[in-house]
Amino acid sequence: MENKTVVLDVNDLRVHYHTPSGDVRACNGVSFKMYRGELLGMVGESGCGKTTTAMALLRLIQTPGRIVHGSALLDNTDILSLSEKELKSIRWRKMALIPQGAMNSLNPLMRINEQIADAIITHEGRQDKEKLKERIISLLKSVGLPERAYSLYPHELSGGMKQRVCIAMAIALRPPFIVADEPTSALDVVVQRLIAQTLKEIKEKMGISMLIIGHDMGLMAQLVDRIAVMYAGNMVELAPVRSIFKEPLHPYTKLLIDSVPSIKEKKALKLNEGMTHDLRNPPPGCLFHNRCPNAKPECRVTVPKLREIKPGHFAACNSFGCEGGAK
Ligand SMILES: Nc1ncnc2c1ncn2[C@@H]1O[C@H](COP(=O)(O)OP(=O)(O)O)[C@@H](O)[C@H]1O
Ligand SMILES: [Mg+2]
């Protein structure tokens, strides 16, 4: 990406969930940057820490979860060290969330315009009625909704339309950074593509940076600029979408890409299920070694760090030399 302006700079983020049998290290030292106007897709199997990582960046981790380490600079302010009061003033204005299952989070008793107005007024105060109406209608249009959605109730809208309302709310105050947690997963495939297209248009028009969590590699390929692959609380690969599909460097990414179904060839699923280790007791060495087809003896000892292997293409794997250290 040219003219890169860093919007978010995440450094060694660690989040633990306290349980009676030990701490679950759901996000275990994650570092990455996000640039202005980019869509970054975060993929990885269920339970690998995608939601935890994203929620920590918005400071929405709930007990028994706890951010135990790290920094996250958003426009040079460390979100992780802000007080609750300071956070209140930047939520929606500087960062917003389209939560998992967002469309079910709309208030069934409020018309669409009232819900969006609520979000705007809470953060900007009372406004001129006519201007607010114009602004809400223009927001609805920008996410592909018809003007009549303005006075409808959530139950009068389809799932895709409700999801669009949630997107409209997230962009209402034009925050530079948005997290969308599985924004399309509850929708049918055609609607998924349409919503993905809308997210892309918003990014292009408004220059918003979005961290989009998902597990559909095929959909991600068409939607995002870069992909971050998570495995067991770690980011194991981060690269522009073209590079990751053309030349995935981490063996886990290769398996993920090989698992994308193709209509042209029938292929056996290479990724075996349910073998991720217990996040409370990570084994020494590389966390992927017990599933890795290329594991070497050193992988049982050395923790690989995410390193830039080629310009802009990062991977955490010992096969590119061992600069990792036991953590
Ligand atoms: N409230 C909680 N208490 C204990 N463990 C949790 C809690 N929430 C999430 N976890 C654990 O943290 C890990 C990461 O979860 P999550 O971030 O939701 O993954 P993903 O979004 O990739 O599916 C999982 O192993 C999950 O079991
Ligand atoms: Mg999740």
Image (cartoon, grey):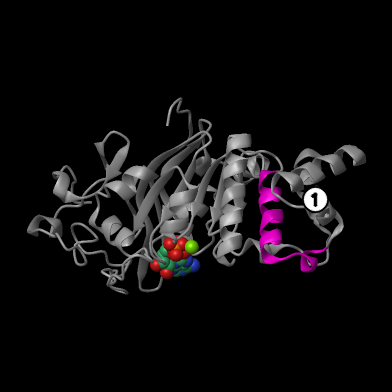
Q: Which residues are magenta?
A: 153-171
Task: Establish whether ligand 2 lies closer than 8 Å to the Cβ of label 1.
Answer: no
Q: Can you give x and y, in whole percent of width and height, for residue 140 in the image?
A: 75, 48
Quarter of the image where ligand 1 sits: bottom left
Residue at 40% x, 48% y is 227
Would you identify the image quadrant in which residue 62 lies?
bottom right
Residue nearer the viewer, 17 or 117: 117
Crowd rating for badge 1 (residues with CA inside 10 Å; few <14, some 14–19, many 20+): some
Q: Is residue 11 visible?
A: no
Residue at 26% x, 69% y is 270
Q: Is residue 289 magenta?
A: no
In the image: residue 85, left or right of residue 307: right
Residue 10 against residue 56 in the figure, above or below? above
Q: Main secondary structure of the magenta part?
A: helix
Mark 1 falls on what kind of element?
A: helix
Check disc 1 and give the amino acid type: Asp
Q: Can you give x and y, in whole percent of width and height, for residue 273 in the image?
A: 31, 74
In the image: residue 323, left or right of residue 117: left
Residue nearer the viewer, 19 or 166: 166
